[in-house]
Amino acid sequence: MKLSPDFILRTVCGETMLMPVGENTKRFNGIFTLSETGAFLLDAVTNGATQKEAAERLSREFDIPHDVAESDASEFFAQLAEYGVLS
Amino acid sequence: MAEGKYNIDAVTARSEPQISQKLHAVGRMTGTPVSGTFELTSRCNFNCRMCYIHDDSAVRGKELTAGEWLDLGRQAADAGTVFLLLTGGEPLLRPDFEEIYVGLKKLGLMVSVNTNGSLITGRIEELFGNNPPVRLNISLYAPDNDGYTALCGAPAYDLVAGNIERMVSAGVPVKLNVSFAGQNAASCERLAELVSTLGLPCQTSVYMYPPVRTGNPGRNADRLSPEEAARLRIKWDCLAGSNGKLRSAAGLIEELSRRECEDAVPPAEGVRCRAGHTSYWISSEGRMLMCGMIPVDCGDVLSEGFGKCWLKTRELMRSVVMPAKCSACALRPVCPVCPAACYAETGIFSAAPEYLCEMSACLSRGLLSMDREEEK
């Protein structure tokens, strides 16, 4: 999966943010801030991992129970899908 | 908050989104230029008498090109700029405004635009409707064409009002900026009613800086007297229903005065000045400034690059010391003093701006007097 060209990912002052660009600002005119785990998941899927693999990596990296990681990842990816962040 | 005659969404420091507050707070420690202003032109199609820039000369030859602005935008984004304001003069006067605006937005910058609202037609109207700024700040000078003529030299009310309505209908986030001078002070209530009817967030100013670019510290013949400015501030805030904060501040002043506690500097409310700490201004000629109201040159961005100029800006601001009188002043809770005001009023940073001293004293007296009247 790739980051949609309607967004740019930026990290400033320790904050990882998704900024809408172009006419996407008509749909979403704000800043999507990512938590540390959110940024981790996004990085994983945009570098070739499936959503399931990303959840597994999250569980290992942050020492989170697998079912919790899977549930959190699922919710996160659903939010990204709602805003068209991934393509 | 006390209820006013009109219900106005007053924009204050407390309206600032949390992400912006957080970025600026961290940026202050890391020296990151989180927000900036690009002054695309000093030209304007209005001739507002109290304007800080007031440049009537044709300076198109000295303005940066669109390519130069976009390159600066890239450098700014790389350095950490998130929020960018496009201003002037009147930025929509530039025939290449769309190229600059679209290009900067593509860099992942949250772009706002300041405008007098008279040129939001045709292609620009379509542009903002399809690709809106994060905020479109439209100055509203008067409630009618005669008022516009008196203040701005152009009977532009109908045009501006129509453009505001079309932008709102198109879903563009609009904020109104209302600035008071001698020519529109009498229209205070009509302007409050108009803003309330429009139902838009509004930021008001009663303090007009001297026209700093022409180098006349302390002089602005068209602005209100300090006493008039204070009375108008109270009047507007009462009309808008936003006088609660001011009256709390006045109460604090009274308490401190009673205790005669010289060491208890009242806590500054709202946002501390960010100029030169996390924000910068680039003039239409490509000079970096700490703030648009401080005409101290911090470098030529074209020849020296953004990064070097930003370092100079930070260094210069670090050397600025507020007047001792201001640091210990009991009127701080109601006084909008800042380094820019000191410099604009006196020509140096370390002298207290007497205009603001008088205005704040009048403001404090006025608010305390209101409280006593109500107690009776």
Image: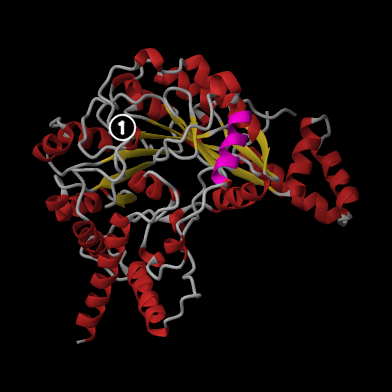
Q: Is residue B315 magenta?
A: yes
Which residue does the image show at 27% across and 69% down from the upper left?
B3
* Corner quadrant of residue B310: top right
Within-10-Å neighbours for mark 1: few <14, some 14–19, many 20+? few
User: Which is more toward the observer, A70 or B80?
Assistant: B80
Magenta stretch holds residue B16: no
**Residue B66 seen from this side:** yes
Dot 1 amino acid type: Thr
Tag 1 residue: B214
**Residue drawn at the location 57% of the way across and 18% of the way down:** B303
Q: Main secondary structure of the magenta part?
A: helix
Which image quarter: residue B354?
bottom left
Measured as percent of width and height from the top left, residue A50 is found at 82, 35
Q: Nearer the viewer, residue A23 or B340?
A: B340
Query: Viewer-proximal residue, B50 or B126?
Result: B50
Question: In which quadrant is the C terminus of chain B drawn?
Answer: bottom left
The N terminus of chain B sits in image quarter: bottom left
Per the image, label 1 sits on a secondary structure element best described as helix
Q: Report the number of discs.
A: 1
Image coordinates of residue B226 in percent, x first then y, are 23, 57
Tell me where the magenta segment starts and ends, as one range.
Answer: B308-317
Residue B41 image point, x, y percent: 37, 24
The answer to whether residue A6 is seen in the rendering is no
Instruction: Give the side of residue B343 with respect to residue B116, left or right.
Output: right
Residue B293, percent from left and from top = 39, 40
